[in-house]
Amino acid sequence: MTIIQETIGNLDVGDPQHFANLTLFPLLSDRKVDADYLTLGEALEKEQVEISEVSDSGSVPELLFKNGSDKDVLLLDGEGLAGAKQNRVLNITILVAAGKTIVIPVSCVEQGRWSYRSGKFRESGRVMYSRGRREKMAQVSGMLKQYGTRNADQGQIWASISDRAVGFDVQSETESLDDIYDSQAETLDRYCQAFKAEKNQAGGVFCIDGKIVGMELFDKPDTFRKLSNKLVESYAMDAIETQGQAITSNRQVANVVQFLSDTVSAKVERFDALGEGEDLRLSADSVVGGGLEAQGRLVQLSVFRVDDSIGGSGTRRGSHVFHHHRGFRRAA
């Protein structure tokens, strides 16, 4: 049994939460994980890490990360960094060991600036919108398999952000993703206020207009709780564009189970991580994903739906992994 099968096989699906056209199915875990690490936000707030350009001249697809803490630090795929010569987002999830300095792979989300605003980066407080993360995840997986690098298609990322700015009618002097988020701040806050992490919630499956979009999962509920607002905003940025309505039905619950089954059965490729553990890259006809296994556990996993096979009119039977599960607590 793989680490993904084992982890997902011990989850329960909780009762869905809704706001407007966004639905979140909590993924509940009663496992006790003895893991003591800081999130990026915590480490920056404590001033125990430094993030800078790799040199005075800089390099768009990479930054220098110095962990001065006595704890590991978790960096999340898609998490935003603001400052220095231009704003970036992380290309992969990384667990940086205490006291280590590494070069981290990033993508630019501010095409119109290449000049210093500060010597160091700060946390942007955001995670890239889910559709952009899905596209970037597929790009990084392709580069890892073909070239062993963790780069994304920078041109496509800039084009995606430009399209998003047009969709939200945002004028940005530096073509910054943060300006698009700022334009929707009040609406995003309403989404965040509507979703509350449950006690044992280690992750969630997100749906827009009744269709599954993606899943976020962590090794312990405390990490999901700390990052939940960022993740809700990530999916809300896509939900706002569609202006649809939330839909919940028994079929949708079955589709959530099918989505988890597709995740378990997806092809997994492993690569040595830049920090601790191994990078996991998932691929199948219906899903694309990436995550991190380290210290004997699945630290983090993000999986996105890439077609309509789950959210469409047909629902396939779940795999045997779920037939023998304790049942997944199903929403009424």
Image: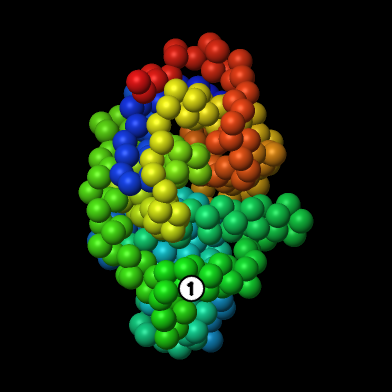
Which colour scheme appears in the figure? rainbow
Q: Residue furthest right?
A: 146
Residue located 40% across and 31% down the image: 248
The C terminus, quarter of image = top left
- Residue 284 in the image: x percent, y percent? 68, 38
The one of 310 and 2 positioned closer to us in this rendering: 310
- Check disc 1 and report the residue beneath it: 166
Regarding residue 321, the answer to whether it shows in the image is yes
Regarding residue 295, the answer to whether it shows in the image is no
Residue located 37% across and 85% down the image: 117
Quadrant position of residue 51: bottom left
The one of 87 and 69 positioned closer to us in this rendering: 87
Residue located 55% across and 36% down the image: 311
47 sits to left or right of 233: left
Is 217 drawn above or below residue 328 in the view shown? below
The N terminus, quarter of image = top right
The amino acid beneath tag 1 is Val
- Residue 94 in the image: x percent, y percent? 49, 53
**Tally of numbered discs:** 1
- Residue 216 in the image: x percent, y percent? 45, 42
Residue located 59% across and 58% down the image: 136
Is 267 drawn above or below residue 113 in the view shown? above
Classify 10 Å Cα crowding around label 1: few (below 14), some (14-19), many (20 and above): few
Is 260 drawn above or below residue 176 in the view shown? above
Helix, strand or loop at label 1? It is helix
- Residue 180 in the image: x percent, y percent? 39, 70
223 sits to left or right of 46: right
301 sits to left or right of 248: right
Is 115 drawn above or below residue 145 in the view shown? below
